[in-house]
Amino acid sequence: PAGVDTGTRIQLAGEGEVGPGGGPAADLYVEIEVEPHQLFTRSDDDLYCDVRVPMTAAALGTQIDLPTLEADADIEGAEPTIGFDIAAGTQSGETVTLRGRGVPHLRGAGRGDLKVRVVVETPTKLDDAQRELLTQLAVERGEERVEGEFAASHRGVFGRIRDAFR
């Protein structure tokens, strides 16, 4: 049945071995083991996946076709996907929850959620033209610092005290 998970036991009444002396057949118990999915990981009825996007797509926003477990596609035989909007300015590690797109509940109505984590890919190799474009962008944005900046929550006690007196 939809919604089963590893460790679920299903009882099949009367499907086991015949009892001693020709008695009634015993019940058969089947224990389910669900194979891992290549894209999704599962926790209870929620599904999790990572979506990798280039930094330009994260900065400008884009829409991608996100695979799901359901046949949402109108074309028969097509990979089941839904349109997934990545908002402009999305940061790496942000998680978006798509309600009701997870695994169906085993007993009862409803479904779990699909939680999509956006992983922004920063280019590791740039040619001279690409490096120049990014440098121009940094100048336009007033980004003069080369080193990173710590968020206030990551500063120690002394750092926060020092900042209070600035």
Image: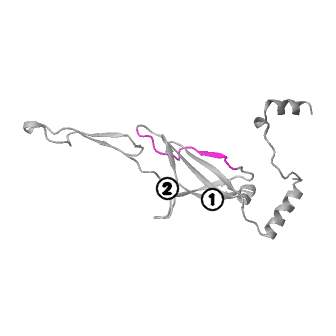
Q: Which residue is mark 2?
A: 38
Bin the neighbour count of mark 2 within 10 Å (Cα to Cα): few under 14, some 14-19, many 20 and up.
Answer: few
Q: Report which quarter residue 152 is drawn in.
A: top right
Viewer-side residue, 139 vs 161: 161
The amino acid type of the residue labelled 2 equals Gln
Give residue 137's quadrant in the image.
bottom right
Q: Is residue 125 above or below residue 93?
A: below
Q: Secondary structure at mark 2?
A: loop
C-alpha separation, residue under disc 1 versus residue under disc 2: 18 Å
Q: Earlier in the sequence, mark 1 or mark 2?
A: 2
Q: Nearer the viewer, residue 76 or 117?
A: 117
Q: Measuring from the top left, give residue 129's x and y in whole percent.
A: 81, 70
Q: Amino acid at mark 1?
A: Ile
Please check the rendered image and state whether residue 94 is part of the magenta-colored stretch, yes or no: yes
Tell me if 88 is positioned left or right of 63 in this view.
Answer: right
Q: Which residues are magenta?
A: 92-106
Q: Is 96 a magenta residue?
A: yes
